[in-house]
Image (tube, rainbow, N blue to C red):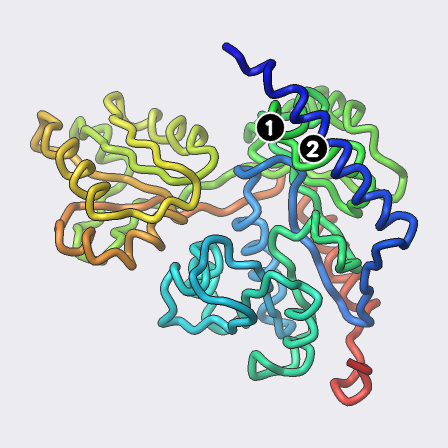
Amino acid sequence: MFRWLLLPFSLIYSIVVWMRNKMFDLNILLSKEFDFPVIVVGNITVGGTGKTPHVEYLVKLLKDKKKVAVLSRGYKRKSKGFVVAKETDNASAIGDEPRQIKRKFPEVAMAVEANRVKGIQKLMEGAAGFDPDVIVLDDAYQHRYVKPGLSILLVDYNRPLESDYILPYGRLRESMYEKKRANIVIVTKTPRELKPIDRRIIAKDMKLFPYQSLYFTFLKYGELTSVFGTSQAIKLEELKEKEYKVLLVTGIANPVPLKEHLQKYVSQIEHLRFPDHHSYLQKDVKKIKQVFDGLSSENKIIITTEKDAVRIFDSKAFKDANLPICYLPIEVEFLDDDRKDFEQKITSFITNNRPPSILNRGI
């Protein structure tokens, strides 16, 4: 109701961000460019654009042909400095998204470091135990101290940049015009059957430059998977056939797509929504159990997101509660013929930017 009161703060914030970007543009603040394939994946909108599944898409694309390292800041981790993730590390040590990536791709080097320049240098020096061929920076579009070789900007189909505002009145981290720094722009979470005319309208509204490529992706959900490996596997179709009641537990920025997907199979969904990257405490588990026990049905289940599952798996309180909790794996797919062109652009970039020998990198 009084959201307009935030407008002056948005104006102040936008001026500060504009001045910072201008200082980088004028080389008053310096960006470091590496003689090495560095790919940045990020966004301008706060949260919920699908960074992690797009990073995972890149990892799957490259891991069998190249030695891949992923570098993240490890948001909300309790550790400090540069850390190379191990499979045994929990979310509190490295962050939930790095933990998820490391669990899915144990052969890939996953590291966390708030100072991305320092993190890249460490990886190039072999800190991860091997000499990587490419480094993917997760959520580093605003980290301008690094000048990437290839920058991928994600834009949520449901939250167009041109109709949003700068924080805190809106959800933009910086002006929509800063999309000019991207080599590739991906519109995420689009409908599977996006009409050609809608694609053309979005492309026109984007006002991209000739050097920028535009692609479209949609979310693809897998089958229900037990978080602790103790619950019996249930097909999504069974939820509908046996009239399950579902308690949806989420701690992500935008749970709407998941809820809409579940509504295709379940008519009754109770939703407990927690803040993004929420660390589940004993009181949270107690509340979840109380709501779940209150569902009046023999057929009931708790469903959560893949990112939440990482934090829940590390929670002793959840393990002790012995609740039937599953998550839906998620991945992205490209619309139409976008996949082939996108993958060709990625592989071409890496081929044309072969890293020099570790002995000749001058770091």
User: Which residue matches tag 1?
Assistant: 168
For marks 1 and 2 on the same chain, the one whose residue lies earlier in the sequence: 2
Crowd class of label 2 (few under 14; some 14 to 19; many from 20; radius 10 Å):
some
Residue 281: percent from left, percent from top: 25, 48
In this view, 224 is above or below 204: below
Judging depth in this view, the residue of 67 and 138 nearest the camera is: 138
Amino acid under label 2?
Answer: Tyr
Q: Amino acid at mark 1?
A: Pro
Q: Quadrant of the C terminus?
A: bottom right
Residue found 65% across the figure and 22% down from its top: 195
The correct choice, above or below, for 163 with respect to 327 in the image is above
Residue 345 percent coordinates (x, y): 77, 54
Dot 1 and dot 2 residues touching (CB under 8 Å): yes
Residue that label 2 marks: 13
- Report the side of 68 relative to 179 (left or right): left
- In the rendering, at what x and y percent does residue 116 appear? 66, 63
Residue 33 lies, with reference to residue 320, above or below; the image says below
The single residue placed furthest to the right in the displayed view is 26
Q: Quadrant of residue 57?
A: bottom right
Which element carries disc 2, helix, strand or loop? helix
Foreground of the two, 105 or 113: 113
Q: Residue at x 67, y 38 (%)?
A: 44
Decide if residue 234 is in sight here. yes
- Residue 256 location, x and y as percent? 43, 28
